[in-house]
Amino acid sequence: MTAIYDCSVESQLLEGMRLARAAIGRGELVVLPTDTVYGVAADAFVPAAVARLLEAKGRDRTSPPPVLIPGIPTLDALARDVPEPVRRLVSEFWPGGLTVVLHAQPSLTWDLGETRGTVALRVPANRIALELLSETGPLAVSSANRSGEPSAQSAGDAEAMLGDAVAVYLDGGVAGGQYEAIGERPGDTSSTIVDATGLDADGGVLRIVRAGVISRERIAAVVGEELLDAASGTGEASGTGAAAGDAADATQP
């Protein structure tokens, strides 16, 4: 049985982080806490590891995972032509519960699934996740649950659903407690997903493809209501690859 490492205990934190780094390096899966829900992580640049993540969740390539990054400086390395309104948003809400879908850098040698040239990015506000990201680099991270099941708010919840498909479980306590659960389902503390790929067109707007812990009102206060799609925030899974994949399963991290 895969061990769960209690990161509130120094010795277990050190051991768990060491084993998590090694597991990621071998292309295996790790469950880690984020500020929203627990996530299951794989090396974003190892296609076999990403495929293993999707298989563990019971999803296919049409539902590409988002990518967690250690900080805003990584944004331009993974996304191209980042619009100025997006820079305002990430300055305000990262680290935190906002995922932004952008056009991916065409030079990236990765395979997240059928992204249609997009990537969903987030910097989590969790010290354990950020420490691991600082050592591994960008990680493909989806919610640590089987597709269609409730999101995991604890390492134990994740282990009950994913079991031995995961090499290491990092227990950082209950996730999501710093947010009001204003997502699309009762108790939902998933991140808000904003699709910014339409901003490069004349008259383009941001589209909220999944309502989450960052409200539309807070986003509008940063970018202006005129930059938000009037019909956004409906939870529909239409749109570009990364955005559609995330909105299709409302328990992304």
Image: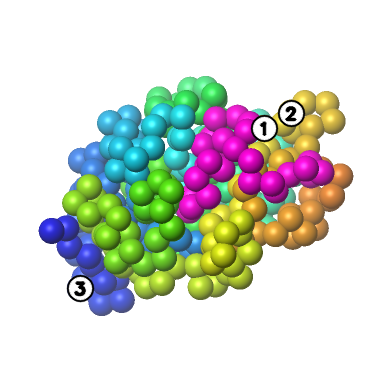
Residue 11: mark in rendering = 3
Whether tag 3 and tag 2 are in contact, CB under 8 A, the answer is: no
Residue 60 x/y as whole percent = 39, 32
The Cα–Cα distance between marks 3 and 2, rounded to whole angstroms, is 49 Å
SS for dot 3: helix
Identify which amino acid the numbered label 2 is placed on. Asp
Q: Amino acid at mark 3?
A: Ser
Q: Distance between the Cα atoms at labels 3 and 1?
A: 44 Å
For image coordinates 38% across by 37% down, the residue present is 59
The mark closer to the camera, 3 or 1, is 1
| For the residues bearing labels 3 and 1, Cβ distance under 8 angstroms | no
Q: Tell me where the magenta segment starts and ends, as one range.
A: 228-253
**Magenta stretch, main secondary structure class:** loop
CA neighbours of label 1 inside 10 A, class few (<14), some (14 to 19), many (20+): many
The answer to whether 253 appears left or right of 32 in the picture is right
Report if the CB atoms under discs 2 and 1 are less than 8 Å apart. yes
Q: Which mark is residue 43?
A: none
Q: Which residue is mark 2?
A: 200
Residue for badge 1:
197
Looking at the image, is mark 3 or mark 2 nearer the viewer? Answer: 2
What amino acid type is highlighted by mark number 1? Thr
Which of the two labelled residues, at mark 3 and mark 2, occupies the earlier sequence position? Answer: 3
Q: CA distance from mark 2 to mark 1?
A: 7 Å
Q: Indicate yes or no whether the magenta region holds residue 250.
A: yes
- Label 1 secondary element: helix
